[in-house]
Image (cartoon, rainbow, N blue to C red):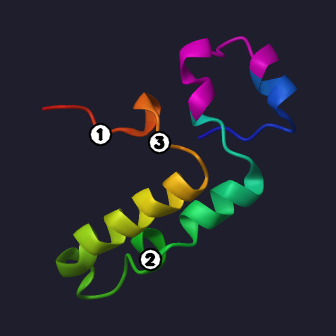
Amino acid sequence: MNLFRSEEHIRNWARFDPATVEGILSLPDLVKVFSGSYFRRRMDPDWVSHSREYAREMVATLGELGKTGPFWKRPKS
């Protein structure tokens, strides 16, 4: 994860890949994603048994943020 001052700085970064533009999150959006149960409850003894529920919650949060395109999809195995 890299933190930048603005989207302009991201686009000027030497290693910027236009194919990943969909992965750009603002700081408030990043906070929203990382404040969900998937991350907050990682140390709970029953985290594994709830991980699918937490993952669905995280996907719903990403959907609320409009992050639903190919960049955010799990790769097919």
Instruction: Give the Cα distance between marks 2 and 3.
Output: 19 Å
> Does the CB distance between marks 2 and 3 fall below 8 Å?
no
Horizontally, residue 36 falls left or right of residue 10, namely: left
The answer to whether marks 2 and 1 mark residues whose Cβ atoms lie closer than 8 Å is no
Residue 70 in percent (x, y) is at: 41, 30
> Which is more toward the observer, 75 or 1?
75
Above or below: residue 2 compared with residue 32: above
Q: Earlier in the sequence, mark 2 or mark 1?
A: 2
Residue highlighted by disc 2: 37
Instruction: State the separation of the CA atoms marked 1 and 3.
Output: 11 Å
Whether residue 17 appears in this view of the structure is no
Tag 1 secondary structure: loop
Give the percent coordinates (x, y) of residue 45.
26, 88
Q: Mark 3 packing: few (<14 Cα in 10 Å), some, or many (20+)? A: some
Give the residue type at disc 1: Arg
Q: Which label sits on residue 74?
A: 1
